[in-house]
Amino acid sequence: MPAVLEALQLEALRRHLDAFDIVHCHGEFAHAALLGPRRRHSLTTIHWRVDELDRSLFFAGFPDLPVAAISAAQEAGIPASNRAGVVHHGIDRHRYRPGPGDGGYAAFVGRMTDQKRPDTAIRVAGAAGMPIRLAGTIDVGNPGYFDERVRPLLGPAAEYVGPVDDAGKQALLGGAAALLFPIDWPEPFGLVMIEAMACGTPVVAWKRGSVPEVIEEGVTGFVVSSEEEAVAALCEAARLDRATVRARFEARFTAERMAADYLAIYRRLLAA
């Protein structure tokens, strides 16, 4: 079904290709071939890692395709000929509201997979003497991970609440003392970090991928390199000023700022 729906979407794009000044694609690969001569007046945003063979082949085949990175860390893996700029993600400033953070627990939100490491989050919270609530889907690409690595660690102090919608995230993140983000892969952005910041919740995140670009050390959270560092940071993060965390979200990660950054790239592409 996904492949069929993508083909239908690309056919709709083909029919209307001449109606737009800029075509901005968030798909995977096939759009680059369809765009043909229009590639120079297009923009592609990639929402996944770019350091694997599939992307290398893609970039080599389409060196004239402008690509907007979602972090400087991601851009480092994009060939110079494709680089069109860096645009950090943003979300509607009203999507989440500041929360009191008075729940006395740490939060984890993400796929239950070895890339996101919920098992590490449980261990860190336990070592810090803080309960943890975990939310997210069980990864379809790695379904055994939850049963083998996460479920055995669950209990009264480590509760898995399942997938959550925006209202669920608001309640979970708004009440959390801090968000744990113990990633074990080159995270291209990490949207949940700015969702937590929108709730005023500081973030303790591992120094991989985009994390040092998103988290301001000692202001919106802490960037760590080990479980031991994370335990100490979790205790410190709970003391950060939540109003400041929210203010930094509004200054850096709103949808308005993201839209303005993309518009600036569109204008550069048209001028060229």
Image (cartoon, rainbow, N blue to C red):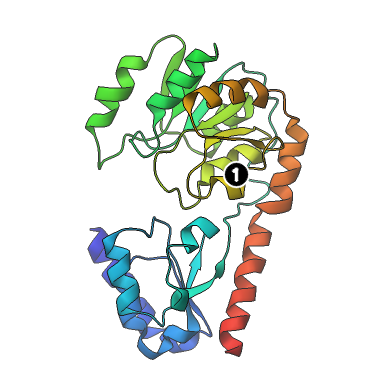
Residue 144 falls in image quadrant: top left
Report the residue at 33% width, 35% height from top. 114
| Percent position of residue 124, x then y | 48, 21
Q: Nearer the viewer, residue 31 or 60?
A: 60
Location of the N terminus (image quadrant) = bottom left
Q: Would residue 209 be found to the left or right of residue 240 on screen?
A: left
Residue extending farthest to the top is: 156
Q: Secondary structure at mark 1?
A: helix
The residue depicted at 38 percent of the width and 37 percent of the height is 111
Residues 259 and 4: in front is: 259
What amino acid is at disc 1?
A: Ile
Q: Which residue: 32% across, 34% down?
A: 138
Q: Quadrant of residue 72?
A: bottom right
Residue 60: % across, % down: 32, 76
Q: Callout 1: 10 Å neighbours few (<14), some, many (20+)?
A: many
State the image coordinates of residue 271 (x, y, percent, origin top left). Answer: 61, 89
